[in-house]
Image: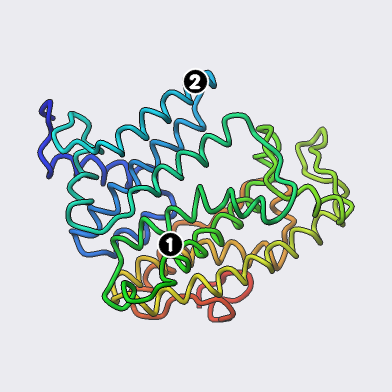
Amino acid sequence: MSPTPTVAEAYAACEEITRKAARNFSYGIRLLPPDRRAALSAVYAFSRRLDDIGDGDLPNDAKSAALEQARADIRRLDPNSSDPVIVALADAARRFPIPLEAFIELADGVERDIVPGVYETFDDMVGYCRLVAGTIGRLSLGIFGTAEAAGRADAAGIADALGVALQQTNILRDVREDLLGGRVYLPQSELADAGVKLSVDATGRLGGPEDALLAYLRSCAARAEEWYARGLTLLGMLDRRSAACCGAMAGIYLRLNRRILADPTPVLTHRLSLPGWEKAVVAARCLAGRPVTAGSRADGARGNAA
């Protein structure tokens, strides 16, 4: 690649990052027409860069410095950069109304993970979810947006709510893995009220005690369904291909959420995920105009492919 990549080279690099790293989102992104697929891949590639900073092995001060450099890159967004992700993102921002300030918020959310804090209440946890996932909803809306969405004052809020829904499922899915990494996102006040003190035993099984924990995880998954119900109303504002993309990405997480709601036991021992074939089924259903909706039992509480 040349020192200053062409726009085509830059987008190709972003799409390669997306293919390799976006285990769930790639199933939706591929449903977009080429121009929007390229733009959303650029958004994903930069978002992934921020996540990798937070999850990487750099010392904390180096992580903070890297996040500050990323904020500076977004504020400048130099189309003549030698960085292909920046070149692609600059072109995408020229062609689509991408709310670039959301990347600054995303960096702020990632910085919260450098020295993990405590989330005392559900509202505190939602504030974190808005930074690390609601931002992705709003960034995506800038690429999905149609005239109808643009005319809705609440469209950005609905996209934000959908991101928060997905992040709640992430938190429930990863509660064991996060605890092993020294992070707890579930609200401390709720855990205390439920009689739960999170711990991992000598076999690596999450507990604290198990019966109370399982009941609490089910209640959290039920609450996340309410956020999906609001967030998925976004699909009705989008054109067919954008709705298919958004529906596929959200539908994969909604299936995971419903599995946790039906039986959270697997979460105690491993990171729950859907097999590739099932993700492909979700994407195909969405492309055919049959997206999963909150409250719909088309795919069953356990996520069976109907």
Q: Is residue 154 above or below residue 71?
A: below
- Name the front one of labels 1 and 2: 2
Is disc 2 surrounded by few (<14), some (14 to 19) or many (20+) residues within 10 Å? few
Q: Secondary structure at mark 2?
A: loop
Q: Quadrant of the N terminus?
A: top left
Q: Which residue matches tag 2? A: 58
> Percent position (x, y) of residue 34?
19, 59
Is disc 1 surrounded by few (<14), some (14 to 19) or many (20+) residues within 10 Å? many
x 24%, y 53%: residue = 39
Going from N to C along the chain, the mark reached first, 1 or 2, is: 2
Q: Secondary structure at mark 1?
A: helix
The residue lying toward the viewer, choosing from 203 and 30, is: 30
Cα distance between the residues tagged 1 and 2 = 30 Å
Left or right of 9 on screen, residue 57: right
x 10%, y 38%: residue = 6
Looking at the rendering, which quadrant does residue 166 occupy? bottom right
Q: Which residue matches tag 1? A: 249
> Percent position (x, y) of residue 151?
32, 76
x 29%, y 65%: residue = 31
